[in-house]
Image (cartoon, rainbow, N blue to C red):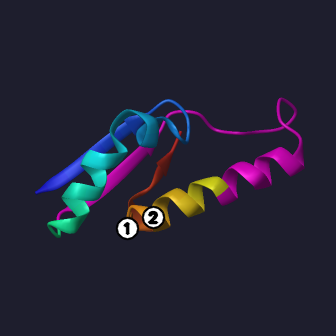
Amino acid sequence: MKVLVISAHPDDETLGCGGMLLRHRSKGESVHWFVATRCYEPGWDLETIEAKRLEVDCVESAYGINPETLVHE
């Protein structure tokens, strides 16, 4: 099975359905992630943008999400 989670912000997927995502991964199913919020200047400073990128990297690692399937919009 392929699972797609759509979240407005990085962390919404964990708060909303993190346990379910881990269960799908434990069954060997693929998990894909769409994040609807994108950090950009001048609304965000470079330090915050980098911190958010690292947060996304941690989440994709924890859920076994292939970075090539991660979509940032």
Q: Is residue 69 above or below residue 42?
A: below
Number of marks in the rendered image: 2
- Report, in whole angstroms, how far the alpha carbon at label 1 lies from the one at label 2: 6 Å
> Which residue is at the front of the view, 17 or 66?
17
Asked whether the residues under the numbered discs 1 and 2 touch, taking CB atoms below 8 Å apart as contact, a structural biologist would say yes
The reply, left or right, for residue 29 in relation to residue 64 is: left
Where residue 59 appears, x then y in whole percent?
51, 57
Q: Does the magenta portion include 52?
A: yes
Q: Amino acid at mark 1?
A: Gly
Graded by Cα atoms within 10 Å as few (under 14), some (14 to 19) or many (20 or more), the crowding at tag 2 reads few
> Which residue is at the front of the view, 52 or 15?
15
Identified at 31% across, 48% down, the residue is 19
Quarter of the view holding residue 54:
bottom right
Identified at 39% across, 63% down, the residue is 65
Where residue 30 appears, x then y in whole percent?
23, 62
Mark number, residue 6: none
Identified at 57% across, 62% down, the residue is 58
Residue position marked by numbered label 1 in the rendering:
64
Q: Is residue 17 above or below residue 23?
A: above
Name the secondary structure under disc 1: loop
Q: Amino acid at mark 2?
A: Ala
Q: Does the magenta portion include 49?
A: yes
Graded by Cα atoms within 10 Å as few (under 14), some (14 to 19) or many (20 or more), the crowding at tag 1 reads some
Give the magenta range. Answer: 29-54
Mark number, residue 62: 2
Name the secondary structure under disc 2: helix
User: Which part of the image, by quadrant, shows the N terminus?
Assistant: bottom left
The reply, left or right, for residue 37 in relation to residue 21 is: right
Quarter of the view holding residue 62:
bottom left
Identified at 39% across, 68% down, the residue is 66
Where residue 67 appears, x then y in whole percent?
46, 66
